[in-house]
Image (cartoon, rainbow, N blue to C red):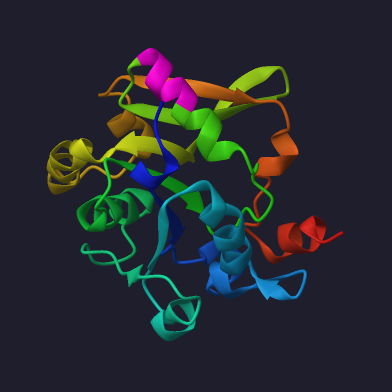
């Protein structure tokens, strides 16, 4: 079994927020608090330590009480750039990532991913949900070995950015979660309104 103290949690809040009009998604309010705070409150009990990847409003994120690391790549290079800086800063054997705009992800997310990763001897465990009869992966909800950093850096240096193309190079296990709504995110202001009860 993988102990939770061997896992660092990373909240991905480094996006451009273009589908939300360019606002910083992690700082948008959900039930009276920034979405990134909800993500941090859900993730922190599941891991040994937590950190945030953000590229603007760093002071607001630092006020949440955990280390904040911007991308090392320019121009909002996507979730893999955040993953790379998380792996570089991670001091544990495993890193788990969650996006800042899904405030209701399962409170057993990390435990389930860790169980399956260990059971299958995989490098990456990724959440998956059933949508319209098809099992779809949720690639930004993943647990991975920090030893994958050299592979990820080489992939990014080659100019590639697609998360699925990189994870496909490694032993990756999909972990099914039955509640697809738990992974509902807010990419637009309308979706954020819809998430509010």
In this rendered view, identify the residue nearer to me: 33 or 188.
33
118 inside magenta stretch? yes
Which residue occupies the extreme top position in the image? 120
Displayed quadrant of residue 173:
top left
* 129 over 94 or under it: above or below: above
Which residue is found at the position 61% from the left and 54% from the top? 42
Extent of the magenta region: 115-120
Q: Is residue 191 above or below residue 138?
A: below
Tell me where residue 96 appears, x and y as whole percent. Answer: 41, 44
The x and y percentages for residue 7 are 38, 44
Q: Nearer the viewer, residue 143 or 28?
A: 143
Residue 10: x, y in percent? Answer: 41, 55
Q: Quadrant of the C terminus?
A: bottom right
Residue 56, quarter of picture: bottom left
Of helix, strand and loop, which mostly describes the magenta segment? helix
Quarter of the image with the N terminus is top left
**Is-magenta flag for residue 91?**
no
């Amino acid at each position: 079994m993988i102990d939770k103290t061997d896992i660092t949690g990373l909240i991905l809040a480094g996006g451009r927020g273009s589908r939300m009009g360019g606002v910083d998604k992690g700082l948008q309010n959900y039930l009276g608090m920034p979405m990134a705070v909800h993500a941090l409150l859900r993730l922190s009990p599941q891991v040994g330590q937590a950190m945030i990847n953000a590229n603007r409003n760093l002071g607001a994120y630092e006020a949440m009480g955990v280390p904040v690391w911007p991308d090392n790549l320019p121009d909002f290079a996507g979730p893999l750039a955040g993953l790379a800086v998380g792996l570089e800063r991670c001091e544990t054997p495993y890193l788990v990532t969650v996006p800042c705009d899904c405030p209701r992800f399962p409170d057993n997310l990390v435990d389930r991913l860790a169980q399956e990763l260990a059971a299958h001897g995989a490098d990456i465990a990724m959440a998956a949900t059933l949508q319209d009869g098809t099992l779809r992966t949720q690639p930004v909800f993943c647990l991975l070995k920090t030893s994958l950093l050299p592979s990820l850096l080489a992939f990014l240096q080659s100019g590639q950015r697609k998360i699925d193309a990189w994870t496909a190079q490694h032993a990756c296990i999909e972990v099914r979660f039955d509640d697809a709504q738990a992974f509902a995110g807010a990419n637009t202001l309308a979706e954020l309104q819809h998430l509010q009860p």
